[in-house]
Image (cartoon, rainbow, N blue to C red):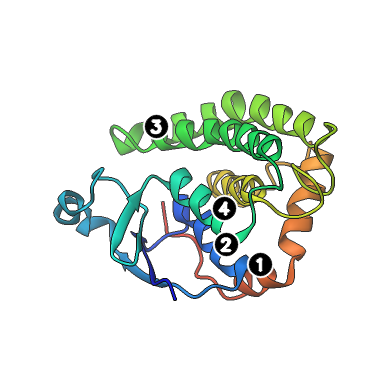
């Protein structure tokens, strides 16, 4: 049996789609969580000096999307064909634009953060959501971004929306996008994911 150990802050963030993949697959993993204040001393111990990272039988993988794609392939959440995988990657890369812009909010002085959040919610998120709304309406989509079962793209989308909602102070950031509202609800309704959502710790204070 493969031994998995996830390393991340005591937060949802970029590690949450990885957790959801484990939960959806019903595969056990260990987690080593740490405080944000501990990161400077831990950072040199990671190959890319970034987190999340995943140990797989003692071998460490960094980069959240690399980890998610690896697990998706192992657990069957990466489509049935190479074309499916390309469409999954298309959605993942579109969602990544949300994460990349969100990361920038936390660079620089804290006093500039409210202005950055306002710009992020007003100027950055809506066009990306509009793109995702179009993708869920394409021929390759069914109940989910690709076909009728949850893939890595759906998990990555789900956790990005959660992050945006936190920055929106709890508002439903996808409410103007009916296909995305329905998609997020279908993901949350999966019994294994719903069980995790019912017990997971709240997001860390930003």
Residue at image position (60%, 31%) is 94
- Cα separation between marks 3 and 1: 29 Å
Q: Quadrant of residue 107?
A: top left
Q: Nearer the viewer, residue 146 or 199?
A: 146
Query: Given contact means CB atoms under 8 Å apart, are the residues at marks 3 and 4 in contact?
Result: no
Q: Secondary structure at mark 1?
A: helix
Q: Secondary structure at mark 2?
A: helix
Query: Given contact means CB atoms under 8 Å apart, are the residues at marks 2 and 1 in contact?
Result: yes
Q: Nearer the viewer, mark 4 or mark 2?
A: 4
Q: Is residue 28 above or below residue 120?
A: below
- Cα separation between marks 4 and 2: 14 Å
Q: Is residue 37 rendered to the left or right of residue 130? A: left
- Cα separation between marks 4 and 1: 19 Å
Q: Which residue is mark 1?
A: 193
Badge 4 or badge 1: first in the primary sequence: 4
Rendered location of residue 36, percent (x, y)? 28, 56
Residue at image position (29%, 32%) is 108
Query: Given contact means CB atoms under 8 Å apart, are the residues at marks 2 and 3 in contact?
Result: no
Q: Nearer the viewer, mark 2 or mark 3?
A: 2
Q: Which mark is residue 20?
A: 2
Q: Is residue 118 rendered to the left or right of residue 81? A: left
Rendered location of residue 100, percent (x, y)? 46, 33
Q: Which mark is residue 104?
A: 3
Residue at image position (81%, 40%) is 141
Q: Is residue 108 rendered to the left or right of residue 192? A: left
Q: Secondary structure at mark 3?
A: helix
Bin the neighbour count of mark 4 within 10 Å (Cα to Cα): few under 14, some 14-19, many 20 and up.
some
């Amino acid at each position: 049996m493969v031994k998995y150990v996830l390393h991340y802050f005591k937060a949802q963030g970029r590690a949450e789609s990885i957790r959801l993949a484990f939960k959806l697959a019903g595969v056990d993993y260990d987690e080593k969580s740490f405080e944000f204040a501990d990161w400077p001393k831990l950072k040199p111990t990671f190959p890319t000096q970034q987190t999340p990272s995943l140990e797989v039988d003692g071998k460490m993988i960094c980069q959240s999307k690399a980890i998610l794609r690896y697990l998706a392939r192992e657990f069957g959440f990466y489509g049935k064909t190479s074309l499916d995988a390309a469409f999954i990657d298309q959605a993942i890369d579109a969602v990544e634009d949300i994460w990349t812009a969100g990361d920038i909010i936390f660079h620089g002085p804290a006093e500039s953060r409210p202005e950055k959040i306002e710009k992020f919610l007003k100027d950055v998120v809506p066009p990306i959501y509009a793109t995702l709304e179009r993708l869920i309406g394409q021929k390759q989509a069914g109940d989910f971004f690709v076909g009728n079962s949850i893939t890595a793209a759906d998990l990555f989308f789900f956790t990005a929306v959660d992050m945006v909602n936190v920055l929106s102070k709890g508002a439903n950031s996808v409410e103007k996008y009916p296909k995305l509202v329905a998609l997020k609800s279908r993901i949350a309704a999966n019994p294994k994911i719903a069980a995790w959502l019912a017990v997971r710790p709240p997001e860390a204070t930003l």
